[in-house]
Image (cartoon, rainbow, N blue to C red):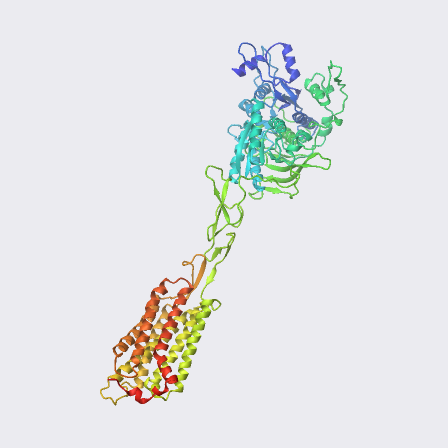
């Protein structure tokens, strides 16, 4: 109903039409020229639109557009320039004249709808005339906003009139099912939004704010950015929208307050130029500074924003835009724009008056009278500024795309005809034919830039990264500092050319925008409940885990043989633990071993010196010397347990221990049997043992050989080997000897225990035999100590960790060896050295009654 009343309001008296033309009207072309082919143009030549009051009791007021947009007017003139250039070309559409109709969309959807209907109708609307059956234009260039383009496509798309936009970037327009006749010469926001996400991630800005236009361009672009940013680990603190149609003052003031109160220092501004102008004005009022602006292509290279008024706010801004180029002859063409070209054209008169601040119908003395001879060469405004031809180049390419499509469709220069021959003109060709040929165009401009459309009607997505920098004169320049090419493989798409980027702050330091400071190496990020993932606390990595970079989300577990250092920032090899000669315990045990071996040798020397005395003879000197020899080996075999375990040392330590102690116990057992047999003699004069020396040697050899056989089998089937024990202690590696076969170890140990048990039983039975020198008593005590030591050893061996296991085993060896040495030989040495009077045959043979 609202749209109907507005259209009814456009039908009226001639004076109403004149008034509408004066202020700018969407119903009538502002610039036009007839031709064989007509290209329509839709530009936001005016940036402000009136808001009519609707009372439904009277005819609504007309929509009037005001505040001329010099940049958009340049786009329109660029379209005319390209058309004139093609008309003067003999190689493209020869003998075919291109005309144009340029309409004003006023940057709003309703005027865009009217412009689309006017482009379709082809006649000035007035009462009593019907619409023609065919569109008056063959293609439309525009519009400059995504929302305006969408509403135009909803009308023009029904009749498959191709629309080629130079500035509509909404990713939604790539939907070929909904918009089959749409093309554009600017990349989709699908790529720009992802490029912006990669940009903020590159500089470490993980906590950003976002402001967007409340239309298809801003809403779709920001939605894509937010999705891409989340994939890059960037969080959005706030996302605010600015609408042109809402109550601007209150809405924009609230948005600026949100920006000021936020903690993020980077602002993503996905805004059209109109909304950007509004936001900057309010930012000046509220003194909004200290922000890093990241902009979309719609305003990042807008020359009218790069003035001293906004430089304090926007200096250092970053954003992606399409590549700039030079269009030969455009500067001179723009300088020739003058109201004298068409004195009846109110747009040209309005442009001239605003540009030079004069009036053609001056009624006030203080107002300058326009002469029409003012020079545009002397003016520096967005209309005459051709230093940043980016969007203008898109308009230029769009016109040439239509021309090439028509050229191919009309078979110009085909079938052997020269290129300057007439085309095969048809009056009744359909618009969908133009769409088909537009899809297949592929040409190269004079600037060597290639133009083609993909299956969605989009061009190749390439961008320049521009940075607002201050030049030596104090002005603002747009410096290309990087690029983004979506056609390249991921990881190579985004590049920055150097690091000489001048930032907005005087210190030229890169701004920081994070919710939480990066965690130091050795810490991990822990998400705070109820807050975005970019807001976290830092928790130290657990033992054995590291994080070697800042902002690590998880700590990494060190490999098996590595452990975390004190800072938990890197994995270092675990400490290898074994009983070594370099530590106190190892030195002490080795010293005790050498002392025991030395003491045994001293006892051997004493016995050798007194070998012919009765005491030594009564002690069975051969077995005594063999026992002393085996005790020496027992003391020395403990040394094999000290030091780093190797394959040979592991086999040697257990077999040497088993064989030497088996030899020792065999000797003690033989001595015990000899004592028992000696005291069983019935005749007192009989002092000769019933078992001969040969039998003693045979028994010792047999008992020892059995242990040797067990050790050989053990080494053959499952020998001990060095083993890195990582299970017992997590922070170190215990280098130990694995038994290989526990059965072999316990058999060896059990056999020694069996021999010791026999000795103890026999000696215990003979302990009370009446004699001045009863050796069975001393053997009993020695075996008691020996068995006590090794019975205690078993639980201590099983429960002791690491190198203490080896220490316990050495201690057991030394304790049992010292027990045998002292119990069996201490009294003898005492008598030999200190009581020689008791070393007589009488004393040895005497009996107590």
Q: Position of residue 662 (x, y in %)?
A: 34, 75
Q: Residue at x 31, y 89 (%)?
A: 841
How many marks on residues?
A: 0
Foreground residue, 809 or 816? 816
Foreground residue, 162 or 62? 62
Q: Position of residue 411 (x, y in %)?
A: 62, 29
Residue 790: image quadrant is: bottom left
Residue 378: image quadrant is: top right
Q: Identify the image quadrant of the C terminus.
A: bottom left
Q: Position of residue 467 (x, y in %)?
A: 65, 37
Foreground residue, 670 or 116? 670
Asked if residue 712 lies left or right of residue 435, the reply is left
Q: Position of residue 214 (x, y in %)?
A: 55, 27
Asked if residue 660 lies left or right of residue 373, the reply is left
Query: Up-down: is 756 above or below 736?
Result: below
Q: Is residue 551 visible?
A: yes
Foreground residue, 268 or 838? 838
Q: Residue furthest bottom?
A: 685
Query: Up-down: is 798 above or below 214?
Result: below
Q: Is residue 161 visible?
A: no
Query: Up-down: is 804 above or below 337?
Result: below
Residue 347: image quadrant is: top right
Q: Residue furthest left?
A: 682
């Amino acid at each position: 109903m609202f749209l109907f009343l507005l259209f009814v309001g456009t039908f009226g008296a001639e004076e109403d039409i004149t008034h509408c033309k004066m202020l700018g009207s969407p119903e009538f072309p502002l610039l036009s020229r007839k031709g064989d082919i007509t290209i329509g143009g839709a530009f936001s030549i005016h940036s402000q639109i009136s808001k009519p009051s609707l009372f439904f009791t009277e005819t609504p007021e007309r929509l009037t557009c005001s505040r001329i947009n010099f940049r958009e007017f340049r786009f329109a003139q660029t379209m005319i320039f390209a058309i004139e250039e093609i008309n003067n070309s003999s190689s493209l559409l020869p003998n075919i004249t291109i005309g144009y109709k340029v309409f004003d969309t006023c940057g709003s959807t309703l005027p865009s709808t009217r412009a689309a209907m006017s482009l379709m109708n082809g006649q000035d609307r007035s009462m009593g005339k019907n619409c023609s059956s065919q569109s008056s234009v063959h293609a439309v260039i525009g519009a400059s906003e995504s929302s305006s383009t969408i509403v135009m496509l909803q009308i023009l798309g029904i009749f498959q009139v191709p629309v080629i936009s130079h500035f509509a970037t909404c990713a939604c327009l790539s939907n070929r099912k909904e918009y089959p006749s749409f093309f554009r010469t600017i990349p989709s926001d699908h790529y720009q939004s992802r490029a912006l996400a990669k940009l903020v991630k590159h500089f470490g800005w993980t906590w950003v704010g976002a402001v967007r236009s409340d239309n298809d361009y801003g809403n779709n672009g920001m939605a894509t950015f937010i999705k891409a940013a989340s994939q890059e680990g960037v969080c959005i603190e706030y996302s605010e929208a600015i609408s042109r149609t809402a109550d601007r003052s209150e809405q924009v003031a609230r948005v600026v307050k949100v920006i000021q109160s936020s903690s993020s220092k980077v602002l993503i501004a996905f805004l059209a130029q109109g909304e950007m102008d509004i936001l900057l004005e309010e930012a000046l009022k509220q003194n909004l500074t200290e922000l890093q602006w990241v902009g979309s292509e719609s305003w990042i290279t807008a020359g009218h924003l790069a003035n001293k008024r906004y430089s304090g706010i926007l200096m250092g801004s970053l954003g992606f835009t399409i590549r700039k180029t030079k269009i030969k002859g455009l500067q001179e063409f723009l300088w020739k724009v003058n109201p004298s070209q068409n004195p009846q054209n109110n747009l040209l008169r309005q442009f001239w008056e605003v540009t030079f601040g004069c009036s053609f119908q001056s009624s006030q003395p203080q107002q300058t009278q326009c002469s029409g001879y003012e020079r545009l060469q002397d003016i520096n405004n967005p209309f005459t500024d051709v230093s940043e031809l980016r969007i203008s180049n898109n308009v230029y390419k769009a016109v040439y795309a239509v021309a090439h499509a028509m050229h191919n469709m009309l078979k110009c220069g085909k079938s052997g005809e020269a290129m300057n021959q007439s085309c095969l003109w048809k009056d009744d060709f359909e618009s969908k034919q133009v769409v088909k040929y537009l899809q297949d165009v592929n040409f190269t401009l004079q600037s060597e830039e290639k133009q083609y459309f993909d299956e969605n009607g989009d061009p190749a997505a390439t961008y320049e990264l521009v940075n607002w920098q201050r030049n030596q004169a104090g002005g603002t320049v747009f410096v290309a500092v990087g690029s983004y090419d979506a056609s390249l493989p991921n990881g190579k798409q985004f590049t920055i050319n150097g690091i000489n980027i001048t930032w907005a702050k005087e210190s030229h330091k890169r701004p920081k925008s994070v919710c939480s400071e990066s965690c130091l190496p050795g810490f991990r990020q822990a998400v705070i409940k109820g807050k975005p993932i970019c807001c976290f606390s830092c928790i130290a990595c657990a033992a054995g885990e590291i994080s070697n970079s800042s902002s690590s989300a998880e700590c990494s577990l060190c490999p098996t043989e590595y452990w975390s250092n004190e800072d938990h920032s890197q994995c270092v090899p675990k400490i290898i633990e074994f009983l070594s000669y370099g530590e106190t315990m190892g030195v002490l045990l080795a010293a005790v071993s050498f002392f025991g071996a030395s003491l045994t040798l001293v006892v051997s020397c004493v016995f050798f010196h007194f070998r012919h005395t009765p005491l030594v003879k009564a002690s069975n000197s051969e077995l005594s010397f063999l026992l002393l020899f085996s005790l020496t080996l027992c003391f020395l075999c403990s040394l094999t347990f000290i030091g780093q375990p190797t394959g040979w040392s592991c086999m040697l330590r257990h077999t040497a221990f088993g064989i030497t102690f088996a030899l020792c116990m065999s000797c003690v057992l033989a001595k015990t049997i000899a004592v028992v047999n000696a005291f069983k003699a019935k005749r007192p004069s009989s002092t000769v043992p019933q078992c001969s020396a040969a039998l003693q040697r045979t028994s010792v050899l047999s008992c020892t050989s059995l242990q040797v056989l067990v050790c050989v089998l053990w080494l053959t089937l499952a020998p001990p080997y060095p083993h890195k024990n990582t299970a017992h202690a997590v922070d170190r590696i215990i280098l130990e000897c694995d038994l290989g076969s526990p059965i072999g170890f316990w058999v060896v140990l059990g056999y020694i225990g069996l021999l010791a048990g026999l000795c103890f039983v026999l000696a215990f039975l003979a302990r009370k035999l009446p004699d001045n020198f009863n050796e069975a008593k001393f053997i009993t005590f020695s075996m008691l100590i020996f068995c006590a030591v090794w019975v205690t050893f078993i639980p201590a061996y099983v429960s002791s960790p690491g190198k203490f296991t080896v220490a316990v085993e050495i201690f057991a060896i030394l304790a049992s060896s010292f027990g045998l040495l002292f119990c069996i030989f201490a009294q003898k040495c005492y008598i030999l050295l200190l009581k020689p009077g008791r070393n007589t045959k009488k004393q040895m043979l005497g009996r107590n009654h």
